[in-house]
Image (tube, rainbow, N blue to C red):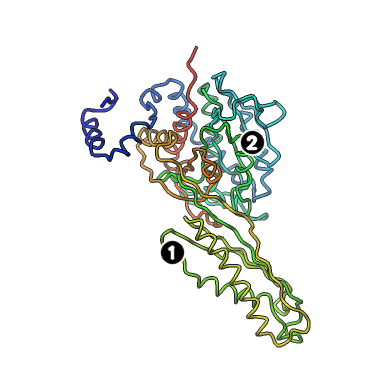
């Protein structure tokens, strides 16, 4: 066995013991795994310059995070935040555009002439000059949008070491890191071998249905060597498996009326409650892990009116596609039964009946990163360099879309600590941010490569 001169004799011995006790198929997988030379990479003066820049500019990076968090960006309303990020990318010397979906795309061209993707100056669409299987581009992305509706107070409050504001961690942290890494490449004058796309994308949350990432994969998919998603702050895990999900909406309508004079008329809210009680009694397995959430209920115009409409939005997630299908069917059957039960219980059916529909609002596909992926090897090397340990997890992120199409992708936190995601008390503590920034930078540069200095 050939070992690296940078590994100590004791580590070589431990590695040898692991290898000789591996099953043959695991050994073959390990032998074929392209591991980055982290010692050589870390010794590169441009890399050291970028790491130093990140360390010295933590205060500026924090200021950027606060500034971006205080620009409201509900899903489908990200344009103001997108404009601010476009300006920041341009200040980092990058050619930047906003595509028709609303994604902010900043391009750092690669130095390898055979690897360049030709992009028209006035368009974000890649031309067909590159071979369809030429995977010569690495994408680093962070989503722009938040779950909070228009009018939410997003002013950042300071309580000790914590910053509190809706969206401060998810995804203020990711956006600040995205800008920081672009600036670090610029400051260190790093010329990558492959093209890098720095992207702030729309529509990751809720009913955005990953529309920004879907558009990006439609445009750049055949050229993508890897996608690195920055989402939240935590560095103790890496999302390598995409959790499939479906978002459903049930709508029940009826004639409506007065609470006193029309009492006994079929009530859409009653029917929705009846159906919901049936649905939440549906059994779900612990393995494959499967969940559901009744997230929104709407309906009615006043307390003394029988409503003419009621709506329910449900989130369904599972590690199994068949379980998703089973729960979707169960929801439809339960709502139908709720309408039937309400109609049977109604005293007065003369003024009309209830109608219902159950529609799919969005669907997120599943997928897994292969264990021998160069992207995973690059992340592990970066973790080793910064002294971090991270466990693989399954989650629902922008990485779902590339993973579902066989493109290597991961989602990682950008450093620091956060909590209370999707709540008004969401918080972030920048302590430890540097580890996340270095980890993301080293993973990115390992995948894109560095052009030799002339």
Residue denoted by label 1: 285
Compute the Cα span from label 1 to label 2: 38 Å
Q: Nearer the viewer, residue 394 or 62?
A: 394
Residue located 47% across and 26% down the image: 50
Disc 2 is placed on an element classified as helix
> Residue beneath label 2, please?
219
Q: Answer above or below: position of 309 versus 417.
A: below
Residue 301 visible (yes or no): no
Residue that appears at 65% across and 33% down: 87
- Is residue 311 in view from this perspective? yes
Q: Position of residue 329 (x, y in %)?
A: 57, 65
Q: Residue furthest top?
A: 454
In the picture, residue 224 is in which quadrant?
Answer: top right
Q: Residue at x 72, y 86 (%)?
A: 263
Q: Nearer the viewer, residue 229 or 349?
A: 349
Q: Quadrant of the N terminus?
A: top left
The x and y percentages for residue 8 are: 24, 28
Q: How many marks?
A: 2
| Residue 373 x %, y % | 43, 36
What is the crowding at mark 1: few (fewer than 14 residues within 10 Å), some, or many (at least 20)? few
- Name the foreground residue: 226 vs 8: 226
Check the image and name the residue furthest to the right.
351
């Amino acid at each position: 066995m050939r070992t690296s001169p940078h590994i100590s004799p004791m580590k070589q011995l431990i590695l040898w013991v692991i290898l000789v006790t591996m099953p043959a198929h695991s050994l073959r997988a390990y032998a074929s795994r392209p591991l980055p030379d982290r010692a050589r990479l870390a010794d590169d003066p441009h890399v050291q310059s970028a790491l130093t820049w990140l360390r010295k500019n933590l205060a500026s990076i924090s200021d950027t995070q606060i500034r971006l968090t205080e620009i409201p960006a509900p899903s489908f309303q990200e344009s103001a935040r997108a404009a601010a990020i476009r300006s920041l990318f341009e200040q980092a010397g990058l050619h930047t555009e906003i595509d028709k979906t609303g994604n902010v795309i900043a391009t750092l061209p690669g130095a390898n002439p055979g690897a360049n993707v030709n992009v028209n100056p006035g368009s974000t669409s890649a031309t067909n000059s590159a071979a369809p299987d030429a995977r010569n581009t690495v994408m680093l992305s962070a989503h722009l949008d938040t779950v909070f509706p228009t009018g939410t107070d997003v002013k950042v409050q300071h309580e000790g070491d914590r910053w509190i504001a809706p969206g401060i961690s998810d995804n203020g942290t990711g956006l600040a890191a995205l800008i920081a890494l672009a600036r670090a490449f610029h400051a260190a004058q790093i010329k990558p071998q492959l093209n890098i796309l720095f992207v702030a994308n729309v529509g990751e949350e809720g009913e955005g249905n990953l529309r920004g990432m879907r558009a990006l994969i439609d445009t750049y998919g055949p050229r993508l060597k890897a996608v690195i998603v920055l989402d939240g702050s935590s560095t103790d895990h890496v999302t390598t498996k995409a959790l499939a999900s479906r978002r459903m909406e049930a709508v029940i309508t009826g004639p409506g009326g007065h609470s006193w004079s029309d009492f006994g008329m079929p009530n859409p809210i009653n029917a929705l409650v009846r159906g919901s009680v049936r649905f939440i009694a549906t059994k779900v397995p612990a393995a494959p892990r499967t969940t559901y959430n009744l997230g929104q209920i709407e309906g009615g115009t006043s307390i003394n009116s029988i409503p003419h409409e009621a709506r329910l939005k449900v989130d369904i997630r599972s590690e199994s596609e068949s379980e998703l299908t089973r729960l979707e069917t169960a929801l439809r059957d339960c709502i139908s039964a709720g309408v039937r039960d309400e109609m049977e219980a109604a005293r007065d059916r003369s003024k009309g009946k209830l109608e219902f529909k159950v529609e799919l609002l969005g669907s997120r596909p599943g997928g897994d990163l292969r264990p021998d992926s160069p992207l995973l090897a690059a992340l592990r090397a970066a973790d080793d360099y910064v002294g971090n340990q991270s466990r693989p997890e399954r989650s629902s992120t922008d990485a779902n879309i590339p993973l579902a199409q066989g493109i290597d992708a991961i989602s990682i936190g950008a450093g620091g600590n956060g909590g209370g995601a999707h709540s008004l008390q969401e918080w972030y503590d920048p302590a430890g941010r540097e580890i996340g920034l270095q980890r993301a930078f080293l993973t990115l540069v390992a995948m894109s490569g560095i052009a030799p200095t002339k």
